[in-house]
Amino acid sequence: MPNVPLMARSALMRFVLASACVALVACSGTTRPKPAEISGVTVLQDIRTSWTAQVGKINFPLVVSAREDRIALANSEGEVAVLNAATGQHLWRVKLDQAIAAGVGSDGQQVAVVTRNNELVTLQDGKVQWRKSLPAQSFTPPLVAGARVFVLTADRSIIAFDGATGRQLWTQQRPGEPLVLKQAGVLLAFNDTLLAGLSGRLVGLDPSTGVVRWESAIATPRGTNDVERLVDLVSPTDRVGDVVCVRAFQTAIGCVNAARGQGVWTRPSVGDMGVSGNDTLLVAPLSNGLVQAWNRATGERLWDTERLKYRSLSAPLVTPRGVFLADNGGWLYLLSLADGALLNRIKLDSEELATAPVFAGGRYVVVSREGRVTGLQIP
């Protein structure tokens, strides 16, 4: 199997059987080489801490939902919270009676999570609205959009619920490989189309009926066993206009024109974290800690940097002043958009980020596995 030593960190630990959702044990192999020390960093771009908060430890595939000046997040013990992104103040916080397996999805008002006993729970203003049992586990945050709640489960089913009542509206199931990833997949809204990652394809569906409108392949399963054939799409994705860009786990990155359902370009890329970009470029880390940037329109390689090589990196966040990434030692880095040069680094916590950084309320928000939430500014 290719690159097993570079995947030892966590990638293989995130495989699960779709039928039983039992995590596989990581393959044995040599350990990742020791990263080079980074010392004497010349600060070329200031980063300021605006606020900090605590939400509790996080050991599930968290995605922070950011809407205007609100962020919704949760911890492993079942606490769900909405914070003011500008100040870090809790707007509301409630503890469910079950641990959480996937979340958080929100449209800015309604919040949705999936519990470890396969229950979809929606909340608003700190109160539970309704609960519905799911036929399988889910590791992808529910999508709350258009007065509906959509769920992508580990058996590759997409289920739609009425947002007000919880009534099931439709289900769409696609056969696929027997393995899925125990990390957040792809589920997002694009105009009047629901976009979902099913195996190595980005699929556009009618959100009212579940009928498939189009499919675009990012990667095709290859290999001699189920592990090698796993090509699930992973979050975060990046959208500019009609074009949505996404990563296929350990295989490729690519961009799709979601208005037409046509692929724009794909490129081989061995990585397990999602992508981020702007109007001109797309950035993603590789499994070995290299960070690469591509021309968003053509897929041409713009630059790559080995400065963080052999570090286990988070998904990136492209900002107007640079690219944020964090490693599993609690360091947050800011890289140059022009060439990937290191502009600054700050220590956040003793553990890795629980999810990719997000932007909301004029702040860049990062959340560690220990539950430390930090709002940052780049002046």
Image: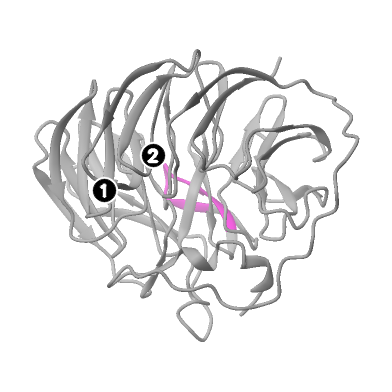
The type of residue carrying mark 2 is: Asn
Alpha-carbon span between mark 1 and mark 2: 11 Å
The type of residue carrying mark 1 is: Thr
In the rendered view, would you say 299 is above or below 288?
Answer: above
Q: Quadrant of residue 82?
A: top left
Residue labelled with disc 1 = 115
Q: Which mark is residue 75?
A: 2
Residue segment shown in magenta: 253-263
Quadrant housing the C terminus? top right
Percent position of residue 351, x then y: 60, 44
Task: Describe the colour scheme in one phrase.
Answer: one colour
Q: What residue is rendered at 45% in x and 62% in y?
A: 232
Q: What residue is rendered at 24% in x and 31% in y?
A: 146
Viewer-proximal residue, 246 or 343?
343
Residue 33 visible at all: yes
Q: What residue is rendered at 18% in x and 42% in y?
A: 208
Q: Quadrant of residue 326?
A: top right
Percent position of residue 53, x then y: 49, 24
Under circle 2, the secondary element is loop
Percent position of residue 249, x then y: 53, 61
Find out whether residue 261 is within the magenta segment.
yes
